Image (cartoon, rainbow, N blue to C red):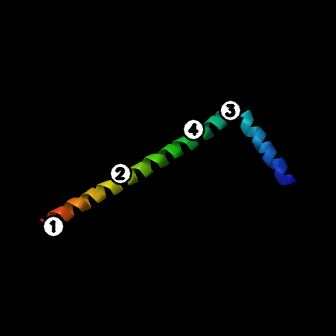
Amino acid sequence: IGYRLGTAKIGETQTDNPVGVLNALAFTLVLGLLEVITDAYFVIQQGEILVQRFFIELLLVE
């Protein structure tokens, strides 16, 4: 029961502070954006490696 009361008080405190809520939201969005960018970069790197392997195979065959 004590845990639930503490959680309710924390929730009330967080909703009473709009700046804190906006800061948390902005932080979450920035982290999500960074994750998307790093994942996209990884996919591009993998694509470049596949193209490089293709050209190496082509050069070695000739």
Q: Position of residue 58 (x, y in %)?
A: 18, 62
Q: Quadrant of the C terminus?
A: bottom left
Name the amino acid type tagged 2. Ile
The CA span between labels 4 and 1 is 51 Å
> For mark 2, what is the residue?
44
Q: Nearer the viewer, residue 47 or 18?
A: 47
Q: Residue at x 33, y 54 (%)?
A: 47
Mark-to-mark CA distance, 1 and 2: 24 Å
> Residue 18 — which label?
3
Mark 1 Cα within 10 Å, few/some/many (few <14, many 20+)?
A: few
Label ID, residue 60: 1
Disc 3 crowd, CA 10 A, few/some/many (<14, 14-19, 20+): few
Q: Which residue is mark 4?
A: 26
Residue at horizontal 57%, vertical 38%? 26
Disc number at residue 27? Answer: none
Task: Give the mark nearer the N terminus: 4 vs 1.
Answer: 4
Tell me the kind of residue under disc 3. Pro
Mark 4 to mark 2: distance in Å?
27 Å
Reply above or below: 56 against 27.
below
- Please determine whether, in this image, residue 60 is positioned above or below residue 40: below
Residue type indicated by callout 1:
Leu
Sooner in the amino-acid sequence: mark 2 or mark 3: 3
